Amino acid sequence: MAVCHDDPVHELGLLREVVAAVEREAARAVVEAQAGAVAGAGLGAGRGAVRVEAVGLRVGTLSGAVPLALTGAWPIAIAGTALQGARLDIEEVQATVWCPACAGEQPVDQFYALTCPTCGTPSGLLVRGREFEVAYADLDIPGASHGATKYVTPDRA
C-alpha cells in the first residue's frame, strides 16, 4: 500500500482538533465579554454568536503536517461549525538545529542527518521545526465595544 503525503486525511484530523480548540476559546471569550457587559462594558445582550474571522497556525517543517494539505482540508474541517467561512493563515516554521561549532542555529531540511548542514559537526539538538500549534484566533464578538479582537488560544491542538 502506497502512502501519499498529499492525502489530507491526516491533516483533516489535525484540523478537527484545531476547530474544537478554537470553538472552546471562542466560547470562553463570549462568556468573558458577557460578564464584562454585566459590569457595564457595553456588550448588547442577544446580539448573536461570536464569529471567527481567521485562525493562525504555526506549522514546523518537520511536524509531519503538510501546509498545502492543511489548506485543502480546511473547508471540510470548518463546514457546519462556528468557524465556517474563517480564513486559515499558516506560518511555516523552518526546522533548525543548534550547532556548537558554529555557535548558532542552522536550518535543516527533511533529510536532516544529525549533523550541522554548514560545518558537518554532529548535532542532534533540534531547536525548532516540530511545531503544530494554534497561534491565534481572530474573533468578532457582536456588540463588544472593541470589535474584532485577536485572542491567543491557550489550548494547543
Image: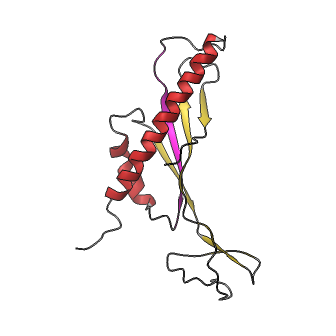
Q: Which residue is located at x 45 percent, y 45 percent?
A: 18
In the visual, does 64 lie left or right of 93?
Answer: left
Quadrant in which the N terminus is drawn: bottom left
Q: Position of residue 137 (x, y in %)?
A: 54, 39
Q: Which residue is located at x 41 percent, y 54 percent?
A: 70
Stretch of the chain drawn in magenta: 47-61
Per the picture, the main secondary structure of the magenta-coloured stretch is strand
- Please identify the residue farthest to the left as the structure is shown: 1
- Please identify the residue farthest to the right as the structure is shown: 103
Q: Position of residue 106 (x, y in %)?
A: 67, 75
Q: Position of residue 154 (x, y in %)?
A: 58, 42
Q: Quadrant of residue 3?
A: bottom left
Q: Which residue is located at x 38 percent, y 56 percent?
A: 11
In the visual, does 92 lie left or right of 80?
Answer: right
Coloration mode: secondary structure
In the visual, does 105 lie left or right of 22?
Answer: right
Q: Find out whether residue 145 is within the magenta segment.
A: no
Task: Answer above or below: position of 89 versus 66.
Answer: above
